[in-house]
Image: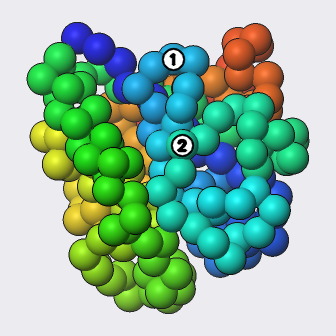
Amino acid sequence: MKKIYIVTTYTGTLLSYLIRNISKTPYAHVSIALNKELRPMYSFGRLNPKTPIFAGFVEENINEGLYAIKTNTMCRVYSLDVTDLQYEELYKNIMNVSENREEYDYDVKALVCLSIDRPREKEYKYVCSHFVADMLQKSDIHILDKPAYETRPNDFYNLEGLELEYEGLLSKYSTREPVYITRVAEA
């Protein structure tokens, strides 16, 4: 067995503020990592940390890029146990996108469509949550009960099967300060 990590974040940028307020959720972005150091995290987001205009496949690091600028980024880090085969498939699927990144685009229209509950699926186009969900599903990791293109960052919030490892400032993650668990007890 191996662990993978799902990271939800809120940076406080204008775009994340709009996503959070439209969706009424605490986190606006989701990434996936293959190690507990979260180096790197894979997702779809801004290619230039200073502007959301250019976006696509990204390899994010805790204290680099946008996260170096937005040091007050809040996050939740979840872990998930997967088999060795699932882990290898996930790695292969992510590397396939990475090696062919010029074929993929950030799907701005899907972001708008998700906000009005009309999700759409376009080949070679992703938003962050669609990418993470698609990589999981293509790797035979079935933790979501909806198609990948309908997935929102909030769908990972307290998702059954995910173990909350950390909640707090992303910049403090490496120190592993105590987790602030806000999970509601199930009846």
Of residue 85 and residue 161, the one placed in the foreground of this image is: 85
- Residue found 12% across the figure and 23% down from its top: 85
Disc 2 to disc 1, C-alpha distance: 15 Å
Residue 59, disc:
2
Q: How many numbered discs?
A: 2
Q: Nearer the viewer, residue 14 or 41?
A: 41
Residue 23 in the image: x percent, y percent?
60, 71
SS assignment at label 1: loop
The N terminus: image quadrant = top left
- Name which residue type carries label 1: Lys
Which residue position holds label 1? 36
**Element class at badge 2:** strand
In this rendering, position of residue 149 left or right of residue 49: left
Rendered position, 53 above or below 103: below
Q: Is residue 56 above or below residue 163?
A: below
Depth order, front residue of 102/92: 102
Q: Residue at x 17, y 40 (%)?
A: 139
Three-letter code for the amino acid on which mark 2 is drawn: Glu
Q: Quadrant of residue 64?
A: top right
Left/right placement of residue 138 relative to residue 160 reads left
At 36% from the left edge and 73% from the top edge, which residue is drawn?
Answer: 125
Task: Name the spot of residue 82 as percent of width and height, x first.
Answer: 24, 23
